[in-house]
Image (cartoon, coloured by chain):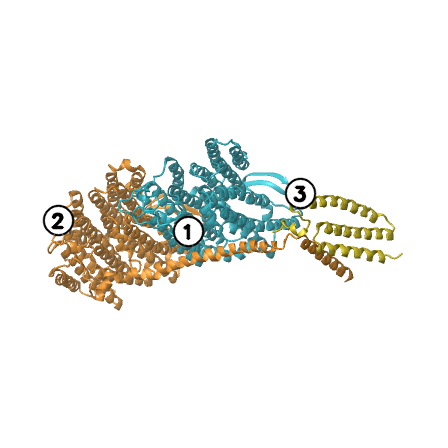
Chain colours: A orange, B yellow, C cyan
Amino acid sequence: MPAEGLLAWSWLLIALPLAGAAILLLGGRRTDRWGHLLGTGTVVAAFVIGLLGTIQLAGLDKKSVGVDLFTFINVGSLDVRAGLLFDPLSAAFVLLITGVGALIHIYSIGYMAHDPGRRRFFAYLNLFVAAMLLLVLGNSFVALYVGWEGVGLASYLLIAFWYTRPAAATAAKKAFIMNRVGDVGLALAIFLMFSQLGTTSYAGVFGSIGTLAGGTITAIGLLLLLGACGKSGQFPLQAWLPDAMEGPTPVSALIHAATMVTAGVYLIARCAPIYDHTPTARTVVMLIGAITLLIGAIAGCAYDDIKKVLAYSTVSQIGYMFLAVGLGPAGYVAGLAHLYAHGFFKAGLFLGAGSVMHAMNDSVDMRRFGGLWKKLPITFVTFSLGYLALIGFPFLSGYWTKDAIIEAAFDRGDTLGYVLGGVAVFAAGLTAFYMTRLMLMTFFGPPRWEEGVHPHEAPPVMTAPMIVLAVGSVGAGFALVRAFPLGTWLAPVFGEPKETTHVLAPLTLTLVLVAVMLLGVGLAWLFVGRREVPVIAPARVSPVVRAARNALYADTVNESLFMRPGQWLTRALVFFDNRGVDGAVNGMAATLGGSSARLGRAQTGFVRTYALGMLGGAVLVAGALLAVTAG
Amino acid sequence: MTLTYYLVLAAMLFTIGAVGVLVRRNAIVVFMCVELMLNSANLTLVTFSRAHGTVDGQVMAFFVMVVAAAEVVVGLAIIMSIYRTRRSASVDDANLLKY
Amino acid sequence: MSSFPFLIVLIALPAAGAAVVAALPRGRELLAKQVALAVSLLVLVLTVLATVAFHAGGARFQLTTSVSWIASFGVRFALGVDGIALVMLLLIGVLVPVVIGASWDDELPSGRSMRAYFAWLLLLEAMMVGVFAATDVFLFYVFFEAMLVPMYFLIGSFGGPRRQYAAVKFFLYSLVGGLIMLAAVIGLYVVSNSQLGAGTFAFDALRQLDITPGVQKLLFLGFFIAFAIKAPLVPFHTWLPDAGSEAPIGGAVLLVGILDKVGTFGFLRYCLPLFPDASRAFAPAVLVLAVAGILYAALLAMGQSDMKRLVSYTSISHFGFIALGIFAFTTEAGTGAVLYMVNHGLATGLLFLVVGMLIARGGSRQIGDYGGVAAKAPLLAGAFLIAGLASLSLPGTNSFVSEFLVLIGSFHAVPVFTILATVGMVLAALYILLMYQRTMQGPPRGVLLEESEAPEPVSAHSGGTATVTAPAPVRSRLRVLDLSRRELAVVAPLIALIIGLGVYPQPLLRLIEPAVHATLSDVGVSGTATGGTHR
């Protein structure tokens, strides 16, 4: 149904940050003084518009409105219109993106205050917000794809923000390439949909997906999953996300924790009508999620870089979300609720980490932290709340949302459900372990600071967003699961939440989870809290720890399977093209030239030779004549 | 009258001329051998002209003579100038025109 | 207005401009540049007006002119444009002034004058307009060959150190193709003579011929080889990296941006409508060449250390996409392929120009001689990045629309080829970002360091492909200057078009689609890209 009132203006949501980015990039140094304010202002304005739009949407009978903008591509039977779809799902994402986005913009004003490239930073952030909003608001797969690659570009630019550092440039490139691998899957899925259904709009595809053969739907589902894996850092494309921490910390908070990396979850949730038809693809989604959440949790236990630990934690938590949405109708709401809660507490944790780095001269080595709780009280409190929310401390956000996912996994009732649920419970224990380790190494124990480090609390412009996010970390879970259930809000998209029979009694599961969490915390205390933390990481460690430190060798596999053979192939082909193909061409030219030179040798310069030649020719001609006339 | 004698004579003259061109080195001698070949051709032309009772062959022979005369003029001039620069009338010494 | 003889003027004007520029006395270089720029801008205005006069839904060929030329062979000086040719004329109109602006302060090899350079450029423009506007096959052939002459001199007189080699290679390759095509052109004449009673070269008449399949295949191959060399398709491609890297930047832009499009244009205009049966028969083979070219050239691009060679190889990869779109025989893919021809001219044109600006500063074409340029020249780096992103078909840039159309249109017809081609997307990201990272990012180093601070460069030029790696000093300053106002004026219109057409490509698509549709109905293929019941 076409939009009216404020919702008809929802294109402003995208246009405002986009205009902000354009002004800041084109305006150059003239905008240096007020650029950050403009950049923040556009996102805050987008948040207000999104909020008002959501309120208007809540009052409508049919909770799905479209905004038709213009014809993007219309050729043959392909008709792609640029248009927006404002429904409860996209509204939820709009609020998350603009809300967390606005907070992080505000935080960045302080964080990037002394960076000469601050204007550029805000321009890229604005560009990201615009692309991300297009991704969630688009009404067709093509619009989604445009936003999808747009956030990839913004992510590339922001990871490489400090581009003079080779590590940052390499990480950015790696992120873009691995995302592109996923994008190929998404693109092929779109091609397949168009080839089979003749349309790329959500309405058209979801309306007639049921008419396709099961194998085709599964293929579409798996291709979409490949795209989701690339964007969300899921197995086997997870290796770029930890490297992406080379970017400024607000970027890690906004893009690589709260919003962009959850786009994969959005994609699968949005394509629920497709996945409803293909249990096979759903099972693969679940398996991918389970594998990833385990890999992330294991790797998170071994790193000493505070941002990398948080990054692997993100990988792991998104694995939970994939597991949830893979469960189908039972899990969509649980996954999205976790996504929301995760958006709050992980963004808060990253901002806290940024505050710590700010205090520690941009060091990220937790072995050189310690005892910071006295020096950074606000950071400590907000960070602790995020920590408790993440490990699932009772009645904080993670407790509600993660439990819901694990419960839903067990509720499948079959062997697979038990295995997946068991893995999720185990990983919850690991989560408690690595996060407690992080807390202990950072905030407790004796200071192990480097020379000349004088920790100090961040300015209010940075702490205020952290406080807001901490409040979200505490309350979001309860709010979304109990007070204002997300399930009810999303009912127009996923259907009314059903009463399910629980395999395990909810209380039993809760008790088990709390016990596992306490076990993880206790183990961390035993391993880290009780002892002195060595400043240099011990080199002699068990193979398990070594594997975890290498993130289970994902980079090694990528390098030996793709990078090195690729480089070898490239070199071989260059040689082949220069020597083989071009060599054949040049060789032909050389042969022609050479044979003409050799023939030229017959020109001796001696008149007699020429005369002999003439005589021979004449005899030949005469002989031929005689032969013809006689024969 | 039989043609054979005339034609055999012409063939012998032509062969002597051709062999001379091929084996002799002195440019003047080569030149004379060329003349010999031309004249053997003339003899043949005139012979056939007489045998057929037409004058075409004789006319052609005059043409050949004229061309030969012109050729002698040009050729001798070239030989003279080569001789002046190289002090040699050997055709093997004038082999610049090659690959 | 519609009776205005646009096409003749569009050929005559730059040709006359070339004569005027060439005739100017020595020393009037500035005047020569101004005349050349004015003429090219006037051509741009005329192409835009011609587009206005063109009715997208009207007759197939419009703005037609036809004068008897060689009456005894039925050759006519016949001009006319369909939507495909028209967008190519627009591309010529845009690129030539940009190239003239970009070459304004070029350092030419000693003894060469700017007047000659600009005269050849304008003459090339006239020939290129002619080749796209001809509707008489013989006239097309004449322009096809005549086009070589100015380009030969542009490369051979004004190019890099190995310009002679590159120019001769380019010329011989094109000439061989052209001669094979000439044989096919004559063959067409013979067939038309026997079928129509009087021989003709008129495209519209030849299209009606009923040629036996065997003859069709021979004639198709004659045209196809010429166009495959020109396009170029693998394995006929090796002249392009040499020509593209040795040509002066302006020449390289026109070579890759427009001249090579004659090949793909020829596929669409001549191979498909004139030899429909042969086109269908050979399509699988051509698709193999196209997809092999996409992947092969992309991998090769990654292995290049010379920036101009790298860009040339990316073009070969892109031409594979265009050929895929043409020989998939669907309206979507064909329209995408034609749009790709335009977009590739803009995107790769910009990439060549920016690379040229970088080379003009550093004096080296080796990627390894640069590093960290973005720190000192943010505008240059920004333009470089936009050109690169357009080259890797990022959504929001024009190339995305065309690549998307080609792939989505081909998928239903030839899924396996399309899936393989889609892998090219990843490779494109690799070669562009590798080059961007090595030249623009990282700590400043290489030939652009100030002499006083620069460490002795480890010279390794002898191999030609070896890279120079200078250790980065701690406090290094680059003497690179950011883009000047002139350079900004050159890249800005291209960037505006890249983004503008990326967001709203519909005006061009409306021009192209009917012409592609007509072409495909000549081939007699259904031309749908979906199996769905939906429209």
> Along the line of sight, which residue is nearer the eye, A17 or C299?
C299
Disc 3 marks a residue whose amino acid type is Ser
Q: Quadrant of residue A224?
A: bottom left
The quarter of the image holding the C terminus of chain A is bottom right
> Along the line of sight, which residue is nearer the eye, C69 or A86?
C69
Disc 1 marks a residue whose amino acid type is Ser
> Label 1 is found on which chain of the structure?
C
Q: Is residue A330 left or right of residue A441?
A: right
Image disc number at residue C462: 1
Q: Secondary structure at mark 2?
A: loop
- The spot of residue A148 in percent (x, y) is 33, 50
- The spot of residue A294 in percent (x, y) is 24, 62
The residue labelled by disc 2 is: A376
Q: Is residue C438 left or right of residue C204?
A: left
Looking at the image, tell me whether mark 3 or mark 1 is earlier in sequence order. Answer: 3
Residue A4 in view (yes/no): no
- The spot of residue A241 in percent (x, y) is 27, 55
> Label 2 is found on which chain of the structure?
A
> Along the line of sight, which residue is nearer the eye, C504 or A536?
A536
Disc 3/disc 1 C-alpha distance (Å): 57 Å
Residue depicted at 67% across the width and 55% down the height = A609
Labels 3 and 1 share a subunit: yes
Q: Are marks 1 and 2 in contact (CB under 8 Å)?
A: no
Q: Residue furthest bottom?
A: A415
10 Å neighbourhood of mark 2: few (<14), some, or many (≥20)? some
The residue labelled by disc 3 is: C72
Q: Quadrant of residue A512?
A: bottom left
Q: Secondary structure at mark 3?
A: helix
- The spot of residue A464 in percent (x, y) is 16, 45
Between disc 1 and disc 2, the foreground one is: 1
